[in-house]
Amino acid sequence: MHDAYPDYEYKRITDITIDDLHNMGAKAVAVDLDNTTVLDSTMHAPGGVKEWLNNVRQAGFPVIIISNTYAIRAWLLSKKFGKLPWISFAEKPHTAAFFKAAKMLNVDISELAMVGDRLFTDVMGANKAGAISIKVDPFEPEKLFAEKFRKERKKEREYMEKRRKERNAENRSFIRKPERRK
């Protein structure tokens, strides 16, 4: 299984600053829809999201939607967000949509920052493609297919706990112990 550990983590998409994007090496930004830019299975963007997208674009970052949602919904939300380009039925974590987005935005895949709320679709797909992966917390628990997503979120939490412990153990093994003075 490919790594689903994100390069970066934030509470909300609106917490990511322009400086953060520059420091990550991003030259373009891809965003997921459900629970990243809009409430799950709705057309409602929580406060600040539309402004954040506008600020990112004004700072010179092209923005694209990459979503597993259906085409008409992606199109309607792209209009709501200022006519963003979009890719629907992305089949994340497959990588084709990430490469297509990078090509559409005229950037190298390593310069595309993917912002999403799901480890095993958004983050894993970005990592497999070689893009910058940014995980945000979901706005709310999923309502549609609630039980399926509750189980998936539990797997995500367990995965992150395990990976954090592994990374902490790896980092500890490289810390030098202070030398004793005689």
Image (tube, grey):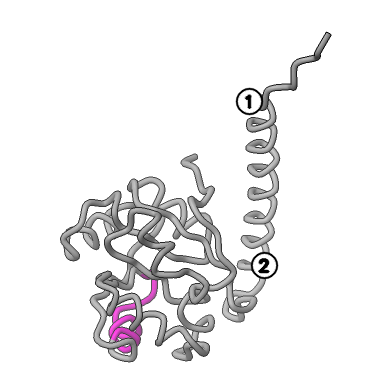
Residue visible at 62% across and 55% down?
A: 156
Is residue 159 rendered to the left or right of residue 116?
Answer: right
Residue visible at 70% across and 48% down?
A: 161
- Disc 1 element: loop
Image position, residue 101 (x, y; %): 24, 62
Mark 1–mark 2 Cα distance, whole angstroms, equals: 37 Å
The dot on residue 150 is 2
Is residue 59 rendered to the left or right of residue 34?
Answer: left
Instruction: Give the residue type at disc 1.
Output: Phe
Q: Nearer the viewer, residue 57 or 103?
A: 57
Q: Is residue 56 above or below residue 121?
A: below
Instruction: Give the residue type at disc 2.
Output: Arg
Image position, residue 66 (x, y; %): 34, 68
Q: Is residue 36 above or below residue 171?
A: below
Q: Main secondary structure of the magenta part?
A: helix
| Residue labelled with disc 1 | 174
Residue visible at 35% across and 86% down?
A: 77
**Which stretch appears magenta?**
67-78
Q: Nearer the viewer, residue 152 or 25?
A: 25
Taking the view exactly as shown, the residue that stands out farthest to the top is 182
The dot on residue 136 is none
Is residue 123 rendered to the left or right of residue 172?
Answer: left
- Disc 2 element: helix
Image position, residue 143 (x, y; %): 61, 81
